[in-house]
Amino acid sequence: MHIQDIFKAHATTFSFEFFPPKTPEASEKLFKTIAQLEALRPTFVDVTYGAGGGTRDLTNELVLRIRSETKLDAIPHLTCVCHSEPEIDAVIEQWASKGVSNILALSGDVPREKGDWDRKQDAFRYAADLVRHIVKFNARGRHPDKRGFGIGVAGFPEGHPATPNRLLELDHLKAKVDAGADYIVTQLFFDNHDFYDFRERCDLAGIKVPILAGLMPIASEKGMRRMAELAAGSRFPAALLRSIQRCGGDEEAVKRVGIHWATEQCRALLDHKVRGLHFYTLNQSDATRQIYLNLGIARG
């Protein structure tokens, strides 16, 4: 279903993100997770993308398997990094031929194994350029839906780590929306005030598309530290850190704190009329299911 139709049908969306497994065993385990989460009837799911061939084919396989074996709408990520224009065209042509309705367009990070990669070799340096390219593809009428692909982009409530200038950062976001993006999914955050302020600044900048709040419950102290590395710039409020410290290293207690914190975030966001909640699941179902139960929005 095209993302514009999804937003028309749902005042609030609930979505989950998965990453493509690298082994058959991990793939089967993930599908058990997807089956558990499908019972919650999410509005849609999305699948991350490995640049430069990393997990690119695996993303495609997972998206098509979700489409064929479940009733879920699956949205693939697509990144600019390590890609020529013909490679990007081949990807979106295939997705169009398979009836994939939407794409999350991202600049992407250089894979570790290509640490010395020169971004000048990429066809597109910024996500706004990729959005424009997808819009041009849409205009050629090669997609079964006459509107072509729906397009999502990323937003950063706590600021983009590569753009310390917050005014310039918002200019970049507006450029993506002006290029043709239909909606924004934010990076994870732990203080809702960052999201509310981000949403207001978007409104002041004339950004009127739906903004979905990205959330990731903390499952362990090790995971939290890993999260801080992957999502550079993430801010962990003192109250959250104090609660985790009180756990004294008890991992089950840390997980309960993470679920409680995320539940309270979601409750407040829903009270503040958030357009959607987007859960970074890390291919796990327990925390997301528990949050749904806590909120009283379990759908199955």
Image: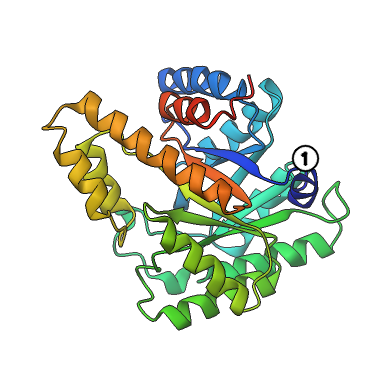
Please state which of residues 56 and 223 is positioned toward the viewer in this rendering: 223
Quadrant holding the C terminus: top right
Asked whether residue 97 is in view, the answer is yes
Q: Is residue 194 left or right of residue 71?
A: left
Which residue occupies the foreground of this view, 121 or 272?
272
Q: Residue at x 24, y 32 (%)?
A: 254
Image position, residue 224 (x, y; %): 25, 43
Task: Give above or below for 14 relative to 291.
Answer: below
Task: Decide: few, some or many residues near mark 1? Use Cα within 10 Å; few <14, some 14-19, many ≥20.
Answer: some
Using the image, determine if residue 217 lies above or below residue 284: below
Q: How many marks?
A: 1
Q: Quadrant of residue 101?
A: top right
- Closest to the observer: 7 or 111? 7
236 left or right of 19?
A: left
Residue displayed at 39% across by 81% down: 165
What is the quadrant of residue 9 in the picture?
top right
Identify whether 102 is placed above or below 132. Answer: above
Q: Position of residue 231 (x, y in %)?
A: 34, 55
| Residue drawn 70% across the image and 60% down it | 182
- Judge whether 210 appears above or below 254 on screen: below
The residue pinned by badge 1 equals 99
Q: Residue furthest left?
A: 248
Where is residue 30 shown, x and y percent of the image?
47, 23
* Amino acid tagged 1: Gly
* Quarter residue 86 falls in: bottom right
